[in-house]
Image (cartoon, helix red, strand yellow):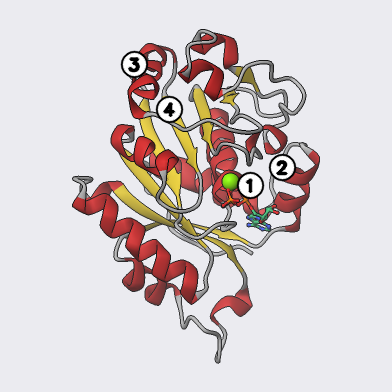
Amino acid sequence: MNAQTIMICSGKGGTGKSTTSVLLGAELARQGQRVLLIELDSGLRSVDLIAGVYGKTVYDIEDVLCGRCQGDKAIVPSPIYPGLSVISAPYEGGEVRPAPLASLILAMRGYFDFILFDTAAGMGAPFQAAAQLAEQALIVLTPDPVALRDGRIVADALIESGHPQDNVRLVMNRVTRQSFARGAPVFDLDECIDTVGVRLLAVIPESRELQLAGAQGEALPEGCAAQKAGAAMAGRILGRRIPLTYTG
Ligand SMILES: Nc1ncnc2c1ncn2[C@@H]1O[C@H](COP(=O)(O)OP(=O)(O)OP(=O)(O)O)[C@@H](O)[C@H]1O
Ligand SMILES: [Mg+2]
């Protein structure tokens, strides 16, 4: 086994990177994949809560990268999403350095089908480290002009640094029927794709279920619109042809 590596990024903060990382990880796992999700967002941990491992984490990614523990000691299986494991970010401090992260990935690759990096907003150390290691990048954006403009900057940076354009994909999150209504600041999904300049992978609807599940550390109810959108996103990552239908 040789895990595929995928980074989740955005530019703008709060667009749903961590939520989408857990959703993708959970749905890849539901489709039989072994998934490790590493949160690279020092001081602003949230994946532990969304993946239901809050309070179960002894070591974090900073402990691993500093050599305070072996990588496997920091891996916590999600109790709510079987097949998904998590390495949490530290509560505070720490700078993500590419070299020890690369060693960790090398050591873990054989045990997982997918390794996901949930990065921080902006293009600082977590973004740079993940960009050096990830084969694919997902840019998670909300349908507003500021997020889309930042997403373009991120997409350009990834492509200029050598990522093939086909391996950089757009995920539109928090989409509602009103997102593209007449008079909305963004006209339609085509405008999102044109602004960012990469292919669309998935559309995740605005979802109370997704928000509540993340906030309470509970599993996303099977069959809700966000779960179906996540399953379709995971299926496309696995190479299945699944039409993009909006079910929000
Ligand atoms: N599709 C969605 N429907 C409803 N709420 C959502 C959706 N996606 C994300 N959210 C909510 O938006 C907020 C921000 O999400 P999240 O923490 O995943 O963003 P982020 O991009 O990781 O933020 P940061 O840049 O701080 O790391 C959370 O309260 C989350 O529950
Ligand atoms: Mg986050």
Instruction: Specify the amino acid type for callout 4.
Output: Phe
Q: For marks 2 and 4, give the CA distance.
A: 21 Å
Q: Residue at x 59, y 34 (%)?
A: 26
Q: Earlier in the sequence, mark 2 or mark 1?
A: 2
Q: Is residue 124 above or below residue 150?
A: above
Instruction: Specify the amino acid type for callout 1.
Output: Gln
Q: Is residue 223 above or below residue 28?
A: below
Tag 1 residue:
227
Nearer the viewer's eye, disc 2 or disc 3? 3
Q: For marks 4 and 3, give the CA distance.
A: 13 Å
The quadrant of the rendering that contains the N terminus is top left
The quadrant of the rendering that contains the C terminus is bottom right
Q: SS class of the residue under badge 1? A: helix
Can you give x and y, in whole percent of width and height, for residue 241 in the image?
37, 48
Can you give x and y, in whole percent of width and height, for residue 156 in the image?
27, 59
Mark 1 residue's CB less than 8 Å from ligand 1? no
Q: Does residue 30 appear left or right of residue 133 in this picture?
A: right
Instruction: Specify the amino acid type for callout 2.
Output: Leu
Q: Quarter-wise, where is residue 30 in the image? A: top right
Tag 3 residue:
106
Q: Are marks 2 and 1 in contact (CB under 8 Å)?
A: yes
Tag 4 residue:
114
Q: Is residue 235 visible?
A: yes
Q: Is residue 238 visible?
A: no
Nearer the viewer's eye, disc 4 or disc 3? 3
Q: SS class of the residue under badge 2? A: loop
Q: Earlier in the sequence, mark 1 or mark 4?
A: 4
| In-front residue for pair 104/202 | 104
Q: SS class of the residue under badge 4? A: strand
Q: Which mark is residue 220?
A: 2
